Image: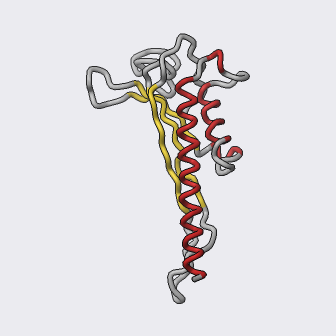
């Protein structure tokens, strides 16, 4: 009975951690695609604000500089003339040969992700008396993306991803 209880608690912990991070990423995308420069608080740019939203809504799973390193914000230009390829414009600040558009233009796609977050199990997993305990962490990777809404006053992008 104790073994079933620990398996249940460990499974619930893993599901809760992934669902919490997924919700934080979805909220950050929604915030990022609707913000204008006049709505920005302080001197932060769009990427920094979006990463801050992920951190504040992750219930402490992504705190500090370590948690911030797991969060990525990318910007993509949509396909042109029904081609299958999208162009990564995350580092584009001006249009040119390799940059068809700048990152925060309306119609571009904002993708926010948390990649490789390590969630340790509550208890080691025991499969048998003659086998070593399994203490391997769960790696959480979640993505969310949406199209940036049209607006006349786009905020600065900042350093992406």
Location of residue 55 (image quadrant):
top right
Give me the residue at 56% from left, 78% from top: 133
Q: Quick check: 130 above or below 109? A: below
- Residue furthest front as drawn: 1
Q: How is the image coloured?
A: secondary structure
Place of residue 31 in the rendered image (x, y in percent of width and height, measured from the top left)? 58, 30
Between 36 and 139, which is closer to the camera in this rendering? 36
Place of residue 64 in the rendered image (x, y in percent of width and height, measured from the top left)? 71, 45
Between 94 and 138, which is closer to the camera in this rendering? 138
Between 75 and 98, which is closer to the camera in this rendering? 75
- Residue furthest top as drawn: 152
Give me the residue at 46% from left, 35% from top: 145
Q: Quick check: 135 above or below 99? A: below
Location of residue 122 (image quadrant):
bottom right
Give me the residue at 43% from left, 29% from top: 88
Location of residue 81 (image quadrant):
top left
- Residue furthest bottom as drawn: 130
Give me the residue at 71% from left, 22% from top: 43
Q: Quick check: 135 above or below 154? A: below
- Residue furthest right as drawn: 42
- The N terminus is located in which quarter? bottom right
- The C terminus is located in which quarter? top right
Place of residue 59 in the rendered image (x, y in percent of width and height, measured from the top left)? 67, 49
Count the labels in the image.
0
Place of residue 56 in the rendered image (x, y in percent of width and height, measured from the top left)? 68, 41
């Amino acid at each position: 009975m104790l073994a079933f209880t620990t398996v249940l608690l460990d499974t619930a912990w893993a599901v809760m951690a992934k669902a919490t991070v997924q919700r934080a990423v979805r909220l950050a995308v929604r915030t990022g695609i609707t913000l204008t420069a006049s709505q920005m608080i302080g001197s932060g740019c769009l990427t920094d604000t979006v990463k801050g939203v992920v951190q504040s809504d992750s219930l402490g799973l992504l705190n500090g500089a370590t948690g911030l390193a797991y969060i990525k914000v990318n910007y993509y230009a949509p396909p042109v003339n029904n081609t299958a390829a999208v162009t990564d414009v995350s580092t584009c600040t001006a249009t040119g040969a390799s940059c068809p558009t700048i990152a925060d233009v309306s119609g571009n796609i904002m993708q926010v992700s948390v990649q490789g977050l390590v969630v340790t199990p509550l208890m080691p997993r025991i499969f048998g008396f003659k086998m070593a305990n399994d203490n391997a962490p769960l790696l959480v990777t979640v993505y969310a993306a949406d199209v940036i809404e049209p607006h006349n006053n786009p905020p600065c992008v900042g350093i992406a991803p």
